[in-house]
Structures are given as C-alpha cells and as structure tokens.
Image (cartoon, grey):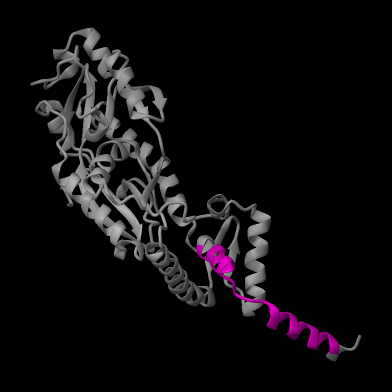
C-alpha cells in the first residue's frame, strides 16, 4: 500500500470519527475530577478504558487536551477551550432531555436527590410534602451519602440535587449553583451526667469521673480535611482529649456519648431526632466553623419548574428549622473559642 493510500485511509478514519456526547461527558468528568481514580469511580469505567476514551478524543481533535502528571490530568490550552464548549453542549442536551420529559404526555419526572443524613431527615420530607400532592408525575430517588460522594453523584449525573455542607469538601463544585438553605452551628455534645455550666477550669472544678469523660471523644470521620480541623479544635480547647471511637454516623456517635463514653463535636442538626433533641445529652455551643447547608444543583435544573419549586420549599424549611435547646457556652469553651482559627462569623 502506497503512502498516498495510507494518508487517504487516515483522513477517511478521522472524518468518520465523531465527537460524541459520550466522549464529551467522559472528557468533562476527567477535567473536573481531582484524580483519574476519582473520574473512573464517577463514570463507572476502568482507568485503562478512561485513558483510551481521552486518547481517542485527542486523536479526533488532533491535539493533546491534557498534560499527564502521575495520577493527575491538567488541561492544556486546547483542553480549556474544549471544556468551555463541552459544558454548553452538555447543559443544552440536559435541558432538552428534561424539557421534553416535562412536556411528554403522562411522562414521569424523577428528581434524584443525594445528601447528608441530617438534611435528608429534617429538610427534604416537609419540603417535598409542601409541594402539590396532586402532581402524580413526580417521584423522588433519594440517596444518603457523604459530601464527597454527593459531589461524585452530581458529576456522574446520578443526582440532580445535592444537599450538603458547602464547606465540608474542597472547592470543586464548579458548574453547579449553590442555593443557601441554612447555617448549622457546631455544638459539644456531652452526657447529661456531665454539667459544664459556668465551668472555668474543668480539671479542677469537675468530679474526676466527669473530667475523665471530657478527656475522651467520639469522632465522626468523613474526610482528612475535616478530621484535621476537628483535631486542631480539640488541641486548642481540650488538649488532654483523645479519641476513643470513630464512626460514620452521628446517630452512633451521640449514642456513645449518651452512654458516657466521651464527648462529641457535632452539628446541631444531627442532634435532632423525630423533631426533638437527642435524649440523654447536653449541648454546648462552640466556636467551630458552622456548616453552610446548601442545595447544589446544575444550573439548568434550577430553571425547571419542579426543581425550582423544590429548591424554594427547601429554603423555606431552612428558615423555619428550629435548632435543639442548648446550654450557655461555659467560660472555658468561650475563652478558648476566641482563639479558634476556624471560627468565622455566620455567612448566610
């Protein structure tokens, strides 16, 4: 075969290759993910398959879209240009699909919601119930997940709305609208048997048994960044405290606190069960950075009627939400909290 035949065949192959929606979605996910491993998990593809998809797209456009660095993919100038165009195409396609669904005769609209436990329990049910119950064309697909998993589901389009704390994950929510719902302050949960009211020096003023409880903590772990912030807070406020248990659920953590095993730094919303405060524990406000609860949603969904109505209902529930009863901050926590480097004034 002559060189001209090879060139003609190559040109023909390139003409037949297309920048498909699937390739654009893979490219968009890789461009927005922190690592190839994360992108692979979001898309449900193996890393070799993911790399092949990106290489195929680069072959079609005729230029590298990423610089490969270990497990990271950094956009080239051409990649940044394509990302801007791809976002418009994907957004338009999603608007088309959702719009057609809304107007289809007898078509069902599934609103896929992923979120953290306390927000799903307290805000979503009354918000959904406040919408027109006669609208039988709406159904909900609800997933409880950690903040990083909520983001993964949004990127992978397995969720349309993410309910989470915006400051609990790295600032990687590009392409999503953040609708503020409420601010959730942190409290120190202690067993009812340990009274901290008016305490200046816990080591001197508390009974030995109570002081021993204050020196142990139950930690809720969902990310390195959060764990580091929690550890620094304990180092500043309760330097003798040591963790005795790690959990994936605040319900479990608070149960251990109620049993007298230690104390727990927890968001106030997580201390509410069936609309009342978790029994057997006392709550003390502290100067730890509060959770900023938001609904994270792709911009195109925020404009669709059913999604917009649910977001408005969630905001209304956020304004109506009552926090559990709390004691006054004891002097030793108030004094130490002023030096907390993570303490910020309410932002909402």
Q: Position of residue 10 (x, y in %)?
A: 77, 82
Q: Residue furthest front?
A: 105
Q: Is residue 74 above or below residue 18?
A: above
What's the residue at 40%, 27% (across, down)? 247
In terms of image quadrants, where is residue 97? bottom left
What's the residue at 53%, 77% (across, down)? 78
What's the residue at 20%, 38% (across, down)? 185
Position of the N terminus, as image quadrant, is bottom right
Q: Residue furthest bottom?
A: 4
Q: Position of residue 174 (x, y in %)?
A: 38, 62
Number of marks present in the image shown: 0
Indicate whether residue 17 is drawn in magenta: yes
Q: Position of residue 192 (x, y in %)?
A: 19, 15
Q: Position of residue 299 (x, y in %)?
A: 34, 64
Q: Which residues are magenta?
A: 5-28
Q: Main secondary structure of the magenta part?
A: helix
Please say whether residue 341 is visible from this viewpoint.
Answer: no
Nearer the observer, 213 or 248: 248
Q: Residue furthest right?
A: 1
Q: Is residue 196 above or below residue 71?
A: above
Please say whether residue 1 is visible from this viewpoint.
Answer: yes
Indicate whether residue 174 is drawn in magenta: no
What's the residue at 13%, 32% (across, down)? 335
In terms of image quadrants, where is residue 7? bottom right
In terms of image quadrants, where is residue 264? top left
Would residue 70 appear left or right of 261 to someone viewing this image? right
Would residue 94 appear left or right of 23 to someone viewing this image? left
């Amino acid at each position: 075969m002559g060189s001209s035949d090879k060139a003609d065949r190559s040109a023909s192959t390139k003409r037949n290759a297309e920048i498909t929606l699937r390739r654009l979605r893979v490219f968009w996910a890789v461009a927005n993910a922190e690592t190839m491993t994360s992108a692979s998990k979001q898309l449900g593809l193996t890393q070799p398959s993911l790399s092949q998809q990106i290489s195929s797209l680069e072959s079609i456009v005729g230029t590298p879209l990423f610089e490969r660095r270990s497990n990271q993919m950094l956009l080239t100038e051409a990649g940044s240009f394509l990302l801007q165009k791809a976002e418009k195409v994907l957004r338009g396609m999603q608007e088309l699909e959702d719009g057609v669904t809304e107007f289809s005769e007898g078509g069902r609209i599934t609103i896929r919601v992923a979120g953290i436990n306390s927000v799903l329990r307290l805000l979503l049910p009354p918000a959904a119930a406040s919408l027109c119950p006669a609208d039988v064309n709406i159904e909900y697909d609800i997933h409880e997940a950690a903040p990083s998993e909520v983001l993964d589901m949004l990127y992978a389009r397995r969720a349309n709305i993410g309910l989470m704390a915006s400051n609990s994950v790295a600032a990687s929510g590009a392409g999503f609208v953040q609708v503020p719902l409420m601010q959730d302050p942190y409290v120190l949960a202690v067993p009812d048997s340990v009274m901290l009211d008016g305490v200046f020096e816990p080591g001197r003023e508390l009974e030995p048994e109570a002081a021993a409880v204050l020196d142990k903590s139950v930690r809720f772990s969902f990310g390195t960044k959060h764990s580091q912030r929690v550890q620094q807070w304990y180092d500043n406020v309760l330097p003798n405290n040591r963790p005795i248990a790690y959990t994936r659920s605040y319900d479990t953590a608070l149960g251990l606190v109620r049993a007298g095993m230690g104390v727990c730094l927890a968001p106030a919303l997580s201390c509410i069960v069936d609309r009342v405060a978790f029994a057997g524990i006392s709550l003390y406000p502290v100067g730890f950075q509060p959770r900023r609860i938001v609904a994270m949603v792709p911009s195109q969904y925020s404009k669709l009627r059913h999604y917009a109505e649910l977001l408005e209902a969630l905001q209304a529930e956020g304004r109506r939400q009552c926090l559990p009863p709390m004691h006054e901050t004891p002097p030793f926590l108030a004094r130490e909290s002023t030096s907390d480097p993570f303490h910020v004034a309410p932002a909402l």
